[in-house]
Structure formats: C-alpha cells, structure tokens
Image (cartoon, grey):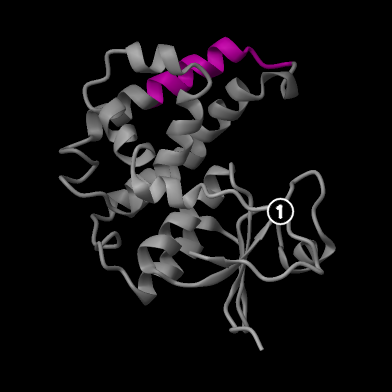
Amino acid sequence: MGKEVPILYSFRRCPYAIRARWALLSSNVDVELREVVLKDKPNEFLSVSHSGTVPCLQLTDKIIDESIDIMIWALRKNDPDSWLDMPTEGYRLIDEVEKKFKPNLDKTKYATRYPQNDSKVSRSSAIEYLIDLDKKIKGEFLFGEKPKLVDVAIFPFVRQFANTDINWFNQFGWKKLKAWLEAFVESNMFDKSQKKFVQWRPDADPVFFP
C-alpha cells in the first residue's frame, strides 16, 4: 500500500506550477505529482480542477485550484526560510504581476494568439513593469537579502519574459533585476523544481515530489 499524500496536477513549464513546486520544495511537503500535458488533459484532472488549469492540489477534504493558495497552504505547514514573513505590500505585488504584467507577457510571447493586438505595445508595457520592479528590489531581493513569498511567486513570469529574448534581457541596463532573476534560475532549487516527469496516465505508478 503506497503512502497517502495530496495529489498535485502540474505542468513543468507553467510559471504558476513552477512557483507552487518551489513552495512544496521549501516546505518539504510530499505530494504525488501528476504531469499534465495541456493539449491532452486527463479526465481525472478535469473532474477535480474547477478551472481546468494547473497547478491543482487535490487534498482529501478540498481542492486548491490557485497556485498562490497552494504556496500558502504548504508554507503554513512548514516555512523554514520564512517566506511568509513579508510586508503586506508583497501580496499587492503578487496581485499586480497578475493584472499588469501577465497579460502583456502573454501578448508578447504568444503574439499569434492575439492577431488584433500590437505585440510591440504589449512588450513595451511589460518592459515598463519590469523597470518599475527593478526599482523595488531593496536588497538582493524585493524586501532585503533573502527571498520572500513575493519573490518566488513573481520570478517564473519574469523568467518567461526574459526567455523571449534572453540576449536583449541580459544586455538591458537593469540595476538589480538580472541578478535577482539569476539567483533563482541558477539555484539548485530551480534544478529540482524543473525535473522532467513523463505525462501522467491513470495506470502509471505514483511519482512523488519533492
């Protein structure tokens, strides 16, 4: 009989899933990871996810369908690096990345999906957001010398934008943003979070994470 743990439906490249996996790694909360291919979503996933999007955490008594809520759930169980110990402004910044940055990121990265949109305008707006974020970094991270929940919640989206033109990003005159991002993507934690898993099938043996 296998161990009973929560089930995490995930997708390796999804920034929302990345930040959820980081919180699970930091908190060392075990889950059964089910890698979802977004073009081939299993019925088991669709039957529990309210939104049909990853990540989705299936507990015995409830479903957590928002990545930030998965992060907070895990960190409330165990928060060895004190990620939850941050100013209230951090939650505002997390909300801001969703409303101000993510739409322009999508319209830049997936321009063909938005034929009526001028991708240059979206890219410019995304860059303006990043310039403002760069100014907000008070130490190595947003609130000092150690990362908090907000840093981990935001960096996957900044990484996704940077990778649309990594040479341009690296050569831009950031004061702190480039080093801030590299602190995450060059870490052992990132390597662990980005481990490749095969597509989950109902008949597959369980895969545990972390």
Q: Quadrant of residue 103?
A: top right
User: Given the current orientation, which residue lies at the most extreme bottom position?
Assistant: 1
- Residue 185, given in percent of the width and then of the height, sits at 38, 38
Q: Quadrant of residue 74?
A: bottom left
Q: Does the magenta segment cover residue 121?
A: yes
180 left or right of 93 in image: left
The one nearer the camera, 55 or 65, is: 55
Q: Does the magenta segment cover residue 111?
A: no
Q: Which residue is painted at 28% across and 55% down in the image?
A: 88
Q: Amino acid at mark 1?
A: Val
Q: Which residue is painted at 82% across and 49% down in the image?
A: 40
**Residue annotated with mark 1:** 36
The one nearer the camera, 92 or 130, is: 130
Whether residue 14 is situated above or below residue 165 in the rendered picture:
below
107 left or right of 144 in image: right
Q: Secondary structure at mark 1?
A: loop
- Residue 189, given in percent of the width and then of the height, sits at 38, 51
- Residue 130, given in percent of the width and then of the height, sits at 37, 26
